[in-house]
């Protein structure tokens, strides 16, 4: 895994950022605080993150260098089509892509650019589900925060509560 080049402060805490030649490669929701700020992120990355945290309706139009399997790349492309404030279940996305919910969860877990590739918009059929391999903790709280920020609603579930 590549080294984080900068930490950016957001309303949900520090996010680690890595890029190459101005192209976003990775966002780390739990960066090593010891990394410190090594470099200034590309202007487009910083500007679009700031815009998103000010207005969740702002989309991302960043060049990305996503490294994954052909299947993961297909899932990540589908994730980028889910509008802010909208959620789909792992099962719904699996049916659309002709695969299993577990495979969708694995691709979401491997997503190198959460938020920009919005895997947080994929939820369990009856609740929040996990986030980046986390079923409780900071990453799951980040998912909850992101969905609230976007105004997403899950009818009939208690996804806003701390315990599922």
Image: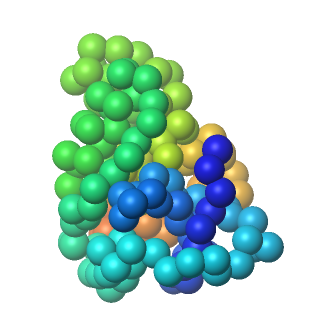
Toward which corner of the image does residue 149 lie, by quadrant?
bottom left
Q: Is residue 68 above or below residue 65?
A: above
Which residue is at the far front?
Answer: 21
Could you say where residue 39 lies in the image, as x and y percent from the top left?
Answer: 56, 78
Task: Tell me if residue 52 can be seen.
Answer: no
Could you say where residue 59 lies in the image, as x and y percent from the top left?
Answer: 22, 66
Q: State the residue in front, 15 or 54.
A: 15
Which quadrant does the N terminus fall into? top right
Toward which corner of the image does residue 22 lie, by quadrant?
bottom left
Could you say where residue 3 lies in the image, as x and y percent from the top left?
Answer: 65, 57
Q: Is residue 104 above or below residue 164?
A: above
Which residue is at the far right?
Answer: 34
Task: Tell me if residue 63 can be seen.
Answer: yes
The number of numbered discs placed on residues in the rendered structure image is: 0
Q: State the residue in front, 157 or 58.
A: 58
Q: State the residue in front, 158 or 152.
A: 152
Would you say 16 lies left or right of 78 here? right
Q: Which residue appears at 69% of the width and 52% of the height?
A: 136
Would you say 138 lies left or right of 111 here? right
Could you say where residue 86 lies in the image, as x and y percent from the top left?
Answer: 25, 54
Q: State the residue in front, 5 or 76.
A: 5
Q: Which residue appears at 67% of the width and 62% of the height?
A: 30
Would you say 96 lies left or right of 21 here? left
Picture colour scheme = rainbow
Q: Which residue appears at 40% of the width and 28% of the height?
A: 72
Q: Which residue appears at 68% of the width and 64% of the height?
A: 31
């Amino acid at each position: 895994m590549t080294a984080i080049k900068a930490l950016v402060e957001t309303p949900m805490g520090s996010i680690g950022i890595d890029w190459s030649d101005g192209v976003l490669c990775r966002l780390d929701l739990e960066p090593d605080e010891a990394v410190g700020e090594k470099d200034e992120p590309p202007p487009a990355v910083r500007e679009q993150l700031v815009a998103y945290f000010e207005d969740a309706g702002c989309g991302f139009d960043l060049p990305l260098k996503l490294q994954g399997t052909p299947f993961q790349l297909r899932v990540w492309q589908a994730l980028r089509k889910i509008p802010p404030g909208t959620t789909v279940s792992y099962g719904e996305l699996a049916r659309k892509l002709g695969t299993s919910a577990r495979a969708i969860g694995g691709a979401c877990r491997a997503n190198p650019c959460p938020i920009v590739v919005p895997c947080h918009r994929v939820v369990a059929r009856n609740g929040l589900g996990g986030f980046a391999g986390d079923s409780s903790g900071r990453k799951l709280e980040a998912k909850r925060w992101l969905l609230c920020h976007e105004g997403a609603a899950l009818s009939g579930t208690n996804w806003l509560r701390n315990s599922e």
